Image (cartoon, rainbow, N blue to C red):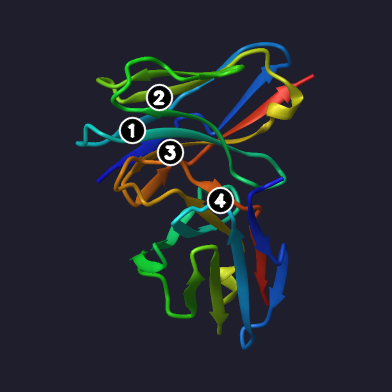
Amino acid sequence: DTEVTQTPKHLVMGMTNKKSLKCEQHMGHRAMYWYKQKAKKPPELMFVYSYEKLSINESVPSRFSPECPNSSLLNLHLHALQPEDSALYLCASSQDTGSRGHPPLHFGNGTRLTVT
Amino acid sequence: AQTVTQSQPEMSVQEAETVTLSCTYDTSESDYYLFWYKQPPSRQMILVIRQEAYKQQNATENRFSVNFQKAAKSFSLKISDSQLGDAAMYFCAYRRDDKIIFGKGTRLHILP
């Protein structure tokens, strides 16, 4: 069982819809991440939150909006997506972002997103 | 900029045999971590093994071990006694501070 929980597992949405992806961890980690993974490709970093503050935005289009309500939760709000945004969206957490070492990331099972 | 290269897109190994997956990286830093992640069809990224750059001793986790050559910037993964459950995509990853950079992955097939 994964210690990072993502919901939903699958999501199909139209280009005019608004939806949200959710991620939760209870390991006391203070860094949380969103990655996008296309088929047969490595994960690509989208956002990093450190102590509930956005620390990295990898030039992600504004139709993706991250939110970190508290240290255990991470959301990704989706609006006006394009078909090319269809991918597996992975959430991850780590003890911190590396200021005191370089801890590994713990990943969730991902949300398979299809934009029609 | 740091890069991670996995030169083997796919590999196959007979069950119970040993296989080595290659990874090279490029960095000007001296303090960093290296990881191998496994992604089976269930799609969860699972940490297999990690290596601190300042440690000369190669990391080992049961049937998994690494050959870390810091000067050569090489970080290969050896899987001993391969099992059917080892079939997955394997990603080599480099971490320093906020970012983790992944290689393109190696698809490992286990032949019964």
Question: Quadrant of residue B52 in the image?
Answer: top left
Q: Would you name the residue on which mark 3 appears?
A: B93
Q: What's the CA distance linking mark 3 and mark 1?
A: 9 Å
Instruction: Say which quadrant the C terminus of chain B sits in.
Output: top right
Q: Position of residue B29 (x, y in %)?
A: 21, 36
Name the amino acid type tagged 4.
Answer: Met
Q: What's the CA distance linking mark 3 and mark 2?
A: 10 Å
- Tell me if mark 2 has few (under 14), some (14-19) or many (20+) residues whose alpha carbon lies within 10 angstroms of its own: many
Camera-side mark, 3 or 1: 3
Q: Secondary structure at mark 4?
A: loop
Is mark 2 in CB contact (under 8 Å) with mark 1? yes
Camera-side mark, 1 or 4: 4
Q: Would you name the residue on which mark 1 appears?
A: B25
Q: Would you name the residue on which mark 2 appears?
A: B75
Q: On screen, A63 above or below A106? A: below
Q: Chain of mark 2?
A: B
Q: What's the CA distance linking mark 2 and mark 4?
A: 29 Å
